[in-house]
């Protein structure tokens, strides 16, 4: 398989996460599509520098998160206004209004997290291990655990304050 075919296969295999990142870090469809395009461009540009120290998917996660965070900083968008829709987190609509109300409160609190915390939560909700999250985000595995504990406590406090 040549470079182009390998790259296309890697993108197809990881496109769900690329779109998920773009959805979390943007406010509308146009911005999301622009970010997806920028992520794929940056992945292609740096594809030769992939050194196989981690898995290809881990490397793609890391590049995609870094591009999203960089684009957000460059455009000076406020993270507090970034909505997370149910498709992003894989939640399906529920007829139970009490459950739906709780889910909305949870989503609002995730939207209020800073860039790093939002990335950690998104990876955690995507069932990544602490080691995988650490490698993608660029912090130690123990810091992931510490940050997740702090984030969970913060979310719990904020959610109970709302109820």
Image (cartoon, grey):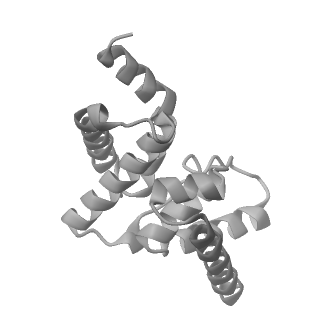
Q: Nearest the camera: 26 or 120?
A: 120
Number of dots carrying numbers? 0
Q: Nearest the camera: 77 or 126?
A: 126
Residue situated furthest top in the rendering = 1
Q: Is residue 64 above or below residue 145?
A: above
- Give the quarter of the image for residue 47: top left
* Left or right, residue 136 beside residue 76: right
Question: Residue placed at 71% from the left, 69% from the top?
Answer: 102
* Residue 35 position within the rendered picture, expressed as x and y whole percent measured from the top left: 30, 46
Question: Residue placed at 67% from the left, 76% from the top?
Answer: 149
Where, quadrant-wise, is the N terminus in this rendering? top left
* Left or right, residue 111 beside residue 125: left
Q: Nearest the camera: 10 or 31?
A: 10
Where, quadrant-wise, is the C terminus in this rendering? bottom right
* Residue 106 position within the rendered picture, expressed as x and y whole percent measured from the top left: 64, 69
Q: Nearest the camera: 97 or 36?
A: 36
Question: Residue placed at 70% from the left, 80% from the top?
Answer: 156
* Left or right, residue 73 beside residue 156: left
* Residue 27 position within the rendered picture, expressed as x and y whole percent measured from the top left: 36, 58
Q: Is residue 25 above or below residue 143?
A: above
Q: Is residue 28 above or below residue 97?
A: above
* Residue 121 position within the rendered picture, expressed as x and y whole percent measured from the top left: 58, 63
Question: Residue placed at 36% from the left, 24% from the top?
Answer: 7
Residue situated furthest bottom in the rendering = 161
- Give the quarter of the image for residue 133: bottom right
Q: Is residue 154 above or below residue 22?
A: below
């Amino acid at each position: 398989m040549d470079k182009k075919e390998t790259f296309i296969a890697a993108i197809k295999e990881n496109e769900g996460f690329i779109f998920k990142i773009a959805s979390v870090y943007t406010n509308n469809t146009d911005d999301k599509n622009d970010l997806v395009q920028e992520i794929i461009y940056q992945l292609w540009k740096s594809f030769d520098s992939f050194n196989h120290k981690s898995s290809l998917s881990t490397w793609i996660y890391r590049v995609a998160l870094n591009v999203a965070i960089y684009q957000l900083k460059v455009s000076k968008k406020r993270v507090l206004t970034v909505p997370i829709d149910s498709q992003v987190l894989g939640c399906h609509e529920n007829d139970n209004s009490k459950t739906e109300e709780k889910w909305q409160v949870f989503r609002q609190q995730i939207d209020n997290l800073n860039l790093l915390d939002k990335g950690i939560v998104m990876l955690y909700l995507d069932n990544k291990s602490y080691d995988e999250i650490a490698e993608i985000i660029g912090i130690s595995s123990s810091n992931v655990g510490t940050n997740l504990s702090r984030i969970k406590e913060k979310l719990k406090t904020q959610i109970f304050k709302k109820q």
